[in-house]
Image (cartoon, rainbow, N blue to C red):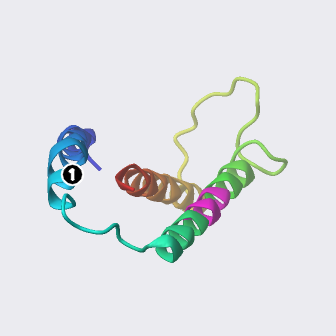
């Protein structure tokens, strides 16, 4: 994902929260989405716990690739490392979703 994508997203978010949203909801009742919000929050907790597990297993826990001390860059790529990088992409995607709530 391109980091420049964040700036228009922030601008639109502020515009929606300050101008468009209040204007749209001016004469309306609040939406009843308590169960949807609970499901969303539970999903975020589960996803973030999964990301923490993936990071710890692949990095600093025993059997991981990294140590807490300095180490060189090997340039080595295998399936486990590719999966770790893919998880990083999904982490950023979830952060965008978290921003939009």
Q: Position of residue 95 (x, y in %)?
A: 44, 51
Q: Is residue 4 left or right of residue 98?
A: left
Q: Where's the C terminus, which quadrant?
A: bottom left
Say which residue appears at 26% left-offset and 42% top-offset. 6
Q: Main secondary structure of the magenta part?
A: helix
Q: Residue furthest top?
A: 70
The quarter of the picture where residue 24 lies is bottom left
16 or 59, which is in the foreground?
16
Mark 1: which secondary structure?
helix
Residue 59 shown in magenta: no
Exactly how many numbered labels are in the figure? Answer: 1
Q: Is residue 84 left or right of residue 12?
A: right
75 or 4, which is in the foreground?
4
Q: Position of residue 85 (x, y in %)?
A: 50, 53
68 or 28, which is in the foreground?
28
Say which residue appears at 63% left-offset and 65% top-offset. 46
Residue 45 shown in magenta: yes
Residue occupied by mark 1: 22
Q: Position of residue 11 (x, y in %)?
A: 19, 39
51 or 44, which is in the foreground?
44
Q: Position of residue 86 (x, y in %)?
A: 47, 59
Q: Is residue 95 left or right of residue 42?
A: left
Say which residue appears at 70% left-offset and 23% top-offset. 70
The quarter of the picture where residue 29 lies is bottom left
Q: Residue furthest right?
A: 62
The quarter of the picture where residue 21 lies is bottom left
- Where are the magenta residues, as a range? 44-50
Q: Residue furthest front?
A: 27
Look at the picture and state if 64 lies above or below 29: above
């Amino acid at each position: 994902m391109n980091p420049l994508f964040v700036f228009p997203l922030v601008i639109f978010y502020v515009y929606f929260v300050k101008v468009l949203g209040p204007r749209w909801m001016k004469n309306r009742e609040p939406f009843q989405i308590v169960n949807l919000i609970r499901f969303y929050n539970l999903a975020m907790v589960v996803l973030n716990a999964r990301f923490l597990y993936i990071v710890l297993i692949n990095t600093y826990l025993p059997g991981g690739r990294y140590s807490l001390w300095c180490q060189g860059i090997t340039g080595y790529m295998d399936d486990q490392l590719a999966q770790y990088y893919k998880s990083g992409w999904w982490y950023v995607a979830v952060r965008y979703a978290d921003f939009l709530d």
